[in-house]
Amino acid sequence: MKNYELTYIISPNMTAEEAQAKAKELESKIQAKEGVILKSQKPVAKTLSYQIKKFGSGFFGILEFQIEPEALLDIKNLIEKDNQFIRHIILVINPAKKQKERRQRIKPVSIALAIAEEVKEDAGKIANFIKEEIIKPVEEKIESMTEQKPVSPTSGEEKKATVKKARSEKNKEKVEIEDIDKKLDEILSE
């Protein structure tokens, strides 16, 4: 059995009660052919957009039913022979297929914006790190060096002590640069 929808217009020469009786008669004919009525809408008086068989109005009704395709031809012939039905159409109602959900395409612009935001955050971290770990200590060293009065070594021992002190400061800088590289790697790996 297939599902069908019958939309029809009954002649306005009838009263509303007679149009409803005609609709009930049609339902009983469908049931006599072993059809099943799924939904029935009472015929309602409507003004037509254009004239059909010289009628400007009619009783508009809709009927959904199930019936075998062979029996449908008999119902169609009954409606066509009855002069009270001025227009009709029978549609096959197929159950709607569930469609797959469409994939969303990510736009390249949105990807670029997301990457730019991440780079911006990382750049801010790197800038703060450089400011705190590199620039400040160098500025402090420069300030401490300008505050100290230069001592002119007079003896060889004093010269050697000054050179050793300068070398030890240089070695400390190397250690600090290595630490800086490690910290940069940590920040970038986040």
Image (cartoon, grey):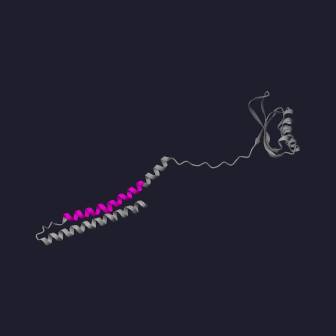
Rendered location of residue 48, percent (x, y) = 75, 32
Residue 180 seen by the camera: yes
Task: Tell me: 54 left or right of 125.
Answer: right
Range of magenta residues = 119-146
Let me know if residue 135 is in the magenta part: yes
Task: Tell me: 159 left or right of 87.
Answer: left
- Position of residue 99 relative to residue 154, above or below, is above
Residue 40 seen by the camera: no
> Which residue is found at the position 32% from the left and 60% from the top?
131
Residue extending farthest to the top is 54
Rendered location of residue 79, percent (x, y) = 84, 35
Let me know if residue 167 is in the magenta part: no
> Which residue is found at the position 86% from the left and 33% from the top?
81
Nearest the eye: 104 or 40 = 104
Rendered location of residue 83, percent (x, y) = 85, 31
Rendered location of residue 164, percent (x, y) = 20, 70
Nearest the eye: 10 or 1 = 1
- Position of residue 133 relative to residue 11, above or below, is below
- Position of residue 113 relative to residue 80, above or below, is below
- Position of residue 155 relative to residue 132, above or below, is below
Q: Main secondary structure of the magenta part?
A: helix
- Residue 35 picture quarter: top right
Nearest the eye: 19 or 175 = 175
Task: Tell me: 161 left or right of 137.
Answer: left
Nearest the eye: 17 or 11 = 11
> Which residue is found at the position 33% from the left and 64% from the top?
178
**The C terminus lies in quadrant:** bottom left
- Residue 8 picture quarter: top right
Residue extending farthest to the right is 32
